[in-house]
Image (spheres, helix red, strand yellow):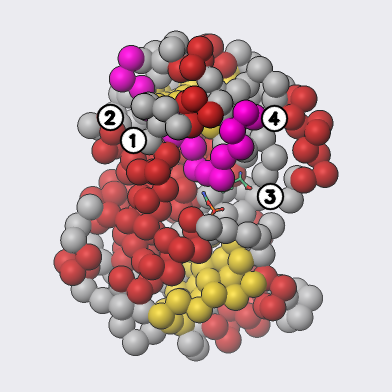
Amino acid sequence: MSRSFLNITDLSAEEARLVLEIAERPIVALGRPLEGRGAALIFEKPSNRTRHSMEMAVFQLGGHPVYTRGEEVGFDSREPVEDVAKIMEGYHGLIAARVFSHSIVERLAAATSVPVVNMLSDWSHPLQGLADALTMQQCLGGLDGRTVAYVGDYNNVARSLCEVSAMLGMHVRLACPTGFDADVAELERILLLGAPSVEQSTRPSDAVAGAHAVHTDTWVSMGQETEKEARRQAFEGYRVDDAMMSLADPSAVFMHCMPAYRGFEVSAEVMDGPRSVVFQQGHNRLHSARAVMAFLLGVR
Ligand code: CP
Ligand code: NVA
């Protein structure tokens, strides 16, 4: 059975460091581990960064990406998830999926002998977490002992960010409204992954004070559109703006997985300002996706 990448925690801390190192290697140094093979990229939700970075990463590894919309595949409606997995392994060296329910990627991985990559689920977004770690490493010059702050909804992006940050030795600070926060068991789980400290507050100023990287994400994730107005009210006060950034370390960077909604979770001044590294972060999606697929396919 191949290794899959459904969550950041599918890697050990040592493996996560290796993947970040592979991300910085020249493409030619990776060989062409997907030579002559395809990669299935199945999307139940829209995407810009993930689709393009994954297609290009598959190409750079010598393979051929095949994009399919979720409704064409029809997980459990047109045919069972397990049948999809077993058919696709006959064509492809790797299967990747962006799904509503995390259980779909788990079932794909259990049913197939090729690696499965989670391209975002309701639970986690590990490809984003890797790019976030790579970007922080590049910008902060190292992660061990640094402080990462996340302000907003404790969602799929936040979970993967907290996991990778903890595994790589960062202090983790969360600011989330009650009802949209991490529960005690989740905070304990993150701490046990290796963070020197994990703290959560309802006050953004508590989380951001002295932080070296300040992250946020949309208040309304894909699939939550009917909750848009209620969520916008619940998150008022959690916008990352210049006043909030002024509490962070003077060298702090601002990060966002994108798509970003200026005027909601982040002000335009911060998103487009001098501390923002969001485009470097977005471009790192390509390098980290290539690295983790190379790793799953045996590159060391
Ligand atoms: N950050 C991210 O996953 O972007 P897309 O939804 O555009 O792929
Ligand atoms: N939390 C967001 C991330 C988008 C890349 C969502 O799930 O829609």
Is residue 223 depicted above or below 240 in this figure?
below
Main secondary structure found in the magenta portion = loop
- Residue 2: give x, y in percent of width and height: 42, 71
C-alpha gap between disc 3 and disc 4: 15 Å
Sequence-first disc among 3 and 1: 1
Disc 3 packing (10 Å; few <14; some 14–19; many ≥20): few
Residue 196, disc: none
Which of discs 4 and 2 lies nearer the camera? The answer is: 2
Tag 4 residue: 180
Magenta stretch bounds: 250-264
Tag 3 residue: 222
C-alpha gap between disc 4 and disc 2: 29 Å
Residue 140, disc: 2
Q: Residue at x 26, y 38 (%)?
A: 138
Residue 138 magenta: no
Q: Please tell me whether mark 3 sits on a helix, a strand or a loop.
A: loop
Q: What residue type is labelled 2?
A: Leu
Disc 1 packing (10 Å; few <14; some 14–19; many ≥20): many
Given residues 282 and 29, the one toward you in this image is 282
Tag 1 residue: 136
Q: Does the residue labelled 4 lie within 8 Å of ligand 2?
A: no
CB contact under 8 Å: marks 2 and 1: yes
